[in-house]
Image: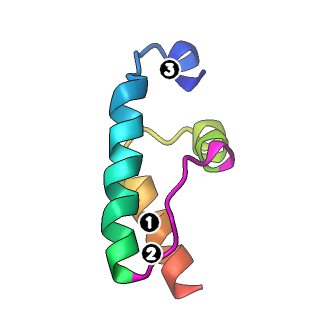
Amino acid sequence: AFGCVNGYTTSPNRELIAINVTNTVRSCCGAYLAIGSFCRSALKNKCGVRTRAASIIMAVVFIVA
């Protein structure tokens, strides 16, 4: 959905592989599972975020909070 709005293509297979690899590594460390978050993506889209740095900043804020 966001790819169509913002003019880029997405690969569902790549997304699925990324989430599965992340969950596998996280489960070895006892961390929470990663899931695709539509709310987070919608918020970043509304704010006009263009880089991946926003995801890193959001992760740091989440860890600190």
Name the image quarter holding the N terminus: top right
Callout 3: helix, strand or loop? helix
Q: Which mark is residue 3?
A: 3
Other-residue count near label 3 (Cα within 10 Å), few / some / many at <14 / 14–19 / ≥20: few
Considering only order in the chain, which callout, 2 or 3, is on the residue closer to the N terminus? Answer: 3
Q: Position of residue 34 (x, y in %)?
A: 49, 59
Magenta region, main secondary structure: loop
- Is 18 or 65 nearer to us in this picture? 18
Q: Which mark is residue 60?
A: 2
| Residue 21 part of the magenta segment | no
Other-residue count near label 2 (Cα within 10 Å), few / some / many at <14 / 14–19 / ≥20: few
Is disc 1 in contact with disc 2, using a CB cutoff of under 8 Å?
Answer: yes
Which contiguous range is marked in magenta?
30-39
- Is 16 or 46 nearer to us in this picture? 16
> In the displayed structure, would residue 18 be above or below residue 14?
below
The residue under label 1 is 57
Q: Amino acid at mark 2?
A: Val
> In the displayed structure, would residue 63 be above or below residue 24?
below
> In the displayed structure, would residue 1 be above or below residue 31?
above
| Residue 38 part of the magenta segment | yes
Most extreme residue toward the bottom is 64
Q: Position of residue 61 (x, y in %)?
A: 52, 75
Is disc 3 in contact with disc 2, using a CB cutoff of under 8 Å?
Answer: no
Q: Amino acid at mark 3?
A: Gly
- Is 5 or 38 nearer to us in this picture? 38
